[in-house]
Amino acid sequence: MDFKTQYSQKQTTAEEAVKAVNSGDWVDFGWCVTTPVALDEAMAKRLPELTDVNFRGGILMWTPQIFQIDNPAEHMTWNSWHMGGIERKAISQGFAYYAPIRYSELPRYYRESKTPSKVAMFQVAPMDEHGFFNFGPSASHMAACCEMADTIIVEVNQNMPRCLGGFEESIHISQVDMIVEGNHPAIASMGAAAPATEVDQAVAKYIVNEITDGACLQLGIGGMPNAVGSLIAQSDLKDLGVHTEMYVDAFVDIAKAGKITGARKAIDKGRQVYAFGAGTQKLYDYLNENPECMSAPVNYTNDIRSISSLDNFMSINNAVDIDLYGQINAESAGTKQISGAGGQLDFVLGAYLSNGGKSFICMSSTFTTKDGTVNSRIRPTLANGSIVTDTRANVHYFVTEYGIVNLKGLSAWQKAEAIISVAHPDFRNELIAEAEKMKIWKNSNKR
């Protein structure tokens, strides 16, 4: 049977497709920009008839219709692999929960899970001549999810970029149970990054000074990594490579400035490797049909063995706060979940194992609350309930607008002294006093 005939036989409406979901089912709902739209609308209409439907997804780019039904907590849970603002609000409404896991572990989790999804539904690019639907910029864990799902429903969006890869970046029509032609909405944009602040620029300068020709880059999301990307694009650096969890707009700018060739990469030479991408339309246009870019599953991109095999690996990520022991919290404000573990620890560990590699955790030294109070992001100890994303044994470089320090291997008093040295000056004496109480301070001429 030819692919067009199969397509015709499997094509259905969103309303018919969501009848595959029943009370008590686990349902995978895409990832980031592949979260369904037409299927979501139909699911929201069906959901009030059901109870205890458990959805899985993450990095929502818009508020799904299923979140907007009356009393969603009576009908569903949302279980997120990585959270953003939309999901934080859903937590407060009592139906969303974070599922803690290292992002790199997701494919194995799906393949070994005792609660595989009954139904998987997500957006894809149109079928190609060989019968494949591309996952767009979200290879991530989708192939593993599909392998274990009982029913697979794809929502075709002609605007979804076709992101080339090498493995696990698409699904064949023979594996698909139902096909829904969506309304072909534009791919959700994160919007252009806010202009870099003076603090962002100061942090970026410290980091860029540590990067050498031929280095391989991983950038996290946020103002500081984007500021680093902008400085790299304007620098004299050359022959840079990319191997990252998330592909962001900054990589497009660096590539278009001629800085990225991947010529010195030991693996995937000449290719920019990523697990998923999200940004502006500029990013989606760049990734579409681009053989230089390689969409790959997250258990490859974030595998410490992959990262460490690339010389001069540079990992650049944000955090929420740090304590004087050197513990990094990158995912919560006390007990309030903000994002997730993601792949930060994988890249911190992998970069240090790389020949010449470095990982940088960066943050502003302070933050200002709504009432105008200025607080230090460098704390004596993390707030009660805060999550340790990177343990004190693993952190390499720590950067604020006041400097950059290498924390690896330092004694407790050395580590406290180094961290305090890049704190905001207004808080240093207070931090020293706390360090003395904690018995991790040795008198020095820096006091």
Image: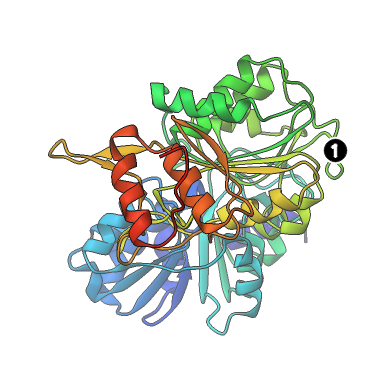
Amino acid tagged 1: Lys
Where, quadrant-wise, is the C terminus in this rendering? top left
Q: Residue at x 36, y 81 (%)?
A: 23
Q: Nearer the viewer, residue 379 or 131?
A: 379
Q: Is residue 325 above or below residue 152?
A: above
Height in image: 48 above or below 68? Answer: below
The answer to which image quadrant residue 258 occupies is top right
Question: Where residue 13 appears, x then y in whole percent?
Answer: 45, 58
Q: Label 1, secondary structure: give it.
A: loop
Q: Is residue 64 visible?
A: no
Q: Residue at x 46, y 58 (%)?
A: 325
Q: In the rendered view of the protein, which quadrant contains the N terminus? A: bottom right
Where is residue 202? Give x, y as percent.
47, 24
The front one of 319 and 436 is: 436
Work out which residue is located at the far bottom of the displayed protein and give it: 114
Q: Which residue is mark 1?
A: 269
